[in-house]
Image: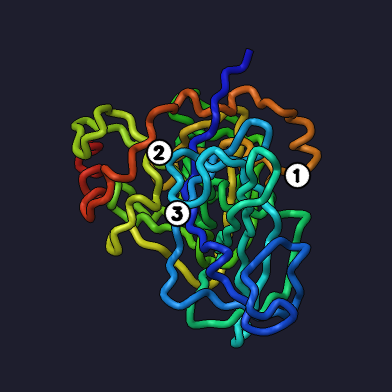
Amino acid sequence: MTRSRLPTAQNVPVYRADDVISTDGANSGDCLSFAAELHLDDVYKIRSGITPDLLSLQPLQDGSFQLADETLVGTAGARLHLDCTLTFMSPDGQISEGLLLVDVSDDGNAGDMFLLPLSAFSTKTEYRLVGIDTLNPTQKYAQVACVSFTRGTHITLATGAQCLIENLSIGDKVLTRDDGAQAIRWIGQSTVRAVGEFAPICVRAGTLNNINDLIISPDHRLFIYQRTDEVGAGRSELLVKARHLINGDTVVVRDGGYVDYFQLLFDSHQIIYAEGIAAESMLIDPRTKPVLPADLASALGDVIPGHSDLPHAGLDVNERLLNRPDAAELLRKSSAR
């Protein structure tokens, strides 16, 4: 019987729908609402002075979502419905996207609503609603939830050779930390605007003993083996999200323009080597499965042997321990040979 556990909760920045107000159009004066109640060409603006709150989203095994106990907004334990993807256009023609999330009570009544910005939004800008997609919000969220490498990343093959990720093929054998040589089962690729939750994180050369810059998605977890416990985690093996190491110097957000993202899928969740840094491969769970092609997702079934992160369970470092400007340097020192 395959062991499994709930994927870890994910914290995402959201605006309360009550703070996103229509300033012109059929719904003028009303706040953001369900897709069925929205009208294209209406203009929306975020209330002045409002900043995003953190919503903690917990995926469930049946593919649905609920609010985790640690959420700062919404009702902990309530189901969360991904209602639609909204596309807005600013006066200068820039496109911004967001997911409309709805807090649903046990009796099926809608509670709080939230806008998860997938692109940067400003309280000083009016946005015209130009798209309402109710068919693919889970696929859009899956793109955010997937851990991804960027074009130009060197991956260590089973032979020890370095290969650019864009030159890899299905079946190529990659060196893994725990299971030796493992063949790639699927390679995902997408090109998105490098803004908001899609803006990649750059771990500059030398920061974690890497020769070249490593540029990855914000929630990509890096594996660190500490020889000394510099951050007070109480263990030697750590998984650290790239976004928790941002310090404006050696680990920075690279926003603007477009970014090519790649996902590497193996028969089980693996730790592989990218630019010499140990980093996780794609983990299939209820958040990420919708990004797979329909035929592959169907063939894999509901439970994928090996795609629990149980081998790495409990290794995630609490963000609080990394909330210091020298966190990356401490990890570099702790893992130095």
Q: In the rendered view of the protein, which quadrant contains the N terminus?
A: top right
Residue 154 appears in the picture as rendered: no
Mark whose residue sits in front, 1 or 2: 1
Q: In this view, does 306 lie to the left or right of 216?
A: right
How far apart in space, not on screen, are marks 3 and 2 (Cα)?
28 Å
Q: Residue at 60% across / 71% down in the picture?
A: 96
Extreme-top residue of the structure: 1
241, above or below 86, in the image: above
Mark whose residue sits in front, 3 or 1: 3
Kindly identify which residue carries mark 3: 54
Q: In this view, does 34 lie to the left or right of 94?
A: right
Element assignment for label 3: strand
Q: Position of residue 138 (x, y in %)?
A: 68, 49
Q: Is residue 152 left or right of residue 307?
A: left
How far apart in space, not on screen, are marks 1 and 2 (Cα)?
27 Å
Kindly identify which residue carries mark 2: 278
